[in-house]
Amino acid sequence: MNRLIHTLETKKKDLLSVYFTAGFPRLDSTGEVMEALCKGGADIIEIGIPFSDPMADGPVIQHSGTVALRNGMTLGLLLDQVKEARSCCGDVPFVAMGYLNPIMQMGAECFFRRAKESGIDGVIIPDLPFSVYMKEYKALSERYDVPVIMLITPETSEERIRLIDDNCDGFIYMVSAASTTGARDSFTASQLDYFRRIDSMGLRHSRLIGFGISNRTTFSEACRYSSGAIIGSQFIKLLESEPTPGEAVEALMRRIGRDSDRG
């Protein structure tokens, strides 16, 4: 069974997915960061594909992508590094997250094939239109058993949400606000209303909430209304400020009030 699907089916609540940009802070640190996250207790690891025009990303993730590209990171190298890290991470699912342009340059089928060979269990492509997914990517996703995870926002219609729930596998990525990524200290009343509204829809797929998760309060509120939370900007800040990836993971777990020992 696909590792991501297995994790989502066996752990229904309090999932922690952590995002980082491959090739940041160093070109050769990707595997080290992934191993630290696996040992430190992440349930899912999201590997960011750096891109020169990351329209959904805030300044922290944009900076990490710029550094990674300057370091020489490419999509092909990322897949090679992920493949090397797979043996150190057991059954922890890997999800690649990146924009459509680098995937199109590699070729969609080549990307899905290599992703599968590298041990990637799902992909998130923020700028992939749902109609294009249905016409060109759904069959590839099913052929290679690499689910495409779609994003929804507070503005996404109920009709579109149900189409995504019916036609995509993995989880539904709930963007907490119609803005770019970035850490925040708390959610607004309107955001909490949005979480409750989606929670009441009875969707068949798990939902993870991302954008703005940075501390115990936002992590617990996200988990209250969904299967878990996605943290990116806060972890990237810690990767830059802490001496090692292991210490960055430990600092993250302290911030969200979670035991960092996977055991």
Image (cartoon, rainbow, N blue to C red):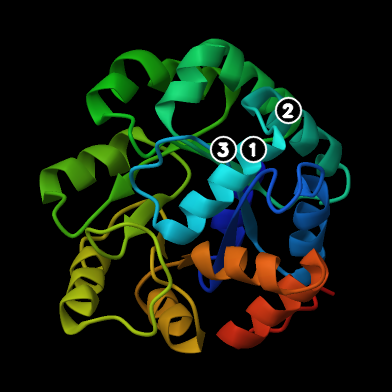
Q: Position of residue 77 (x, y in %)?
A: 73, 28
Q: Position of residue 79 (x, y in %)?
A: 71, 29
Q: Position of residue 254 (x, y in %)?
A: 66, 86
Is residue 5 visible to us here?
no
- Which image quadrant is residue 179 in? bottom left
* Residue pictured at 38% horizontal, 77% vertical: 184
Which mark sits nearer the N-terminus, 2 or 1?
Answer: 1
| Of the two numbered discs 3 and 1 in the rendering, the one whose residue sits closer to the viewer | 1
As shown in the figure, which amino acid type bears the numbered disc 1?
A: Arg
Check the picture and name the quadrant holding the C terminus.
Answer: bottom right
In whole angstroms, how far apart are the C-alphas of marks 2 and 1? 14 Å
- Crowd around label 1: few <14 · some 14–19 · many ≥20 (10 Å): few
Residue 146, placed above or below residue 16: above
- Crowd around label 2: few <14 · some 14–19 · many ≥20 (10 Å): some
Q: Secondary structure at mark 2?
A: helix
Decide if residue 24 is on the left or right side of residue 152: right
Foreground of the two, 257 or 20: 20
* Residue pictured at 39% horizontal, 51% vertical: 57
As shown in the figure, which amino acid type bears the numbered disc 3?
A: Ile
According to the picture, the residue beneath numbered tag 2 turns out to be 77
Is residue 123 visible to us here?
yes
Which mark sits nearer the N-terminus, 2 or 3?
Answer: 3
According to the picture, the residue beneath numbered tag 3 turns out to be 49
| Disc sitting over residue 70 in the figure | 1
| Of the two numbered discs 2 and 1 in the rendering, the one whose residue sits closer to the viewer | 1
In whole angstroms, how far apart are the C-alphas of marks 3 and 1? 13 Å
- Which image quadrant is residue 109 in? top right
Which mark sits nearer the N-terminus, 3 or 1?
Answer: 3
Pointers 3 and 1 in contact (C-beta within 8 Å): no
Q: Secondary structure at mark 3?
A: loop
Decide if residue 102 is on the left or right side of residue 199: right
Pointers 2 and 1 in contact (C-beta within 8 Å): no
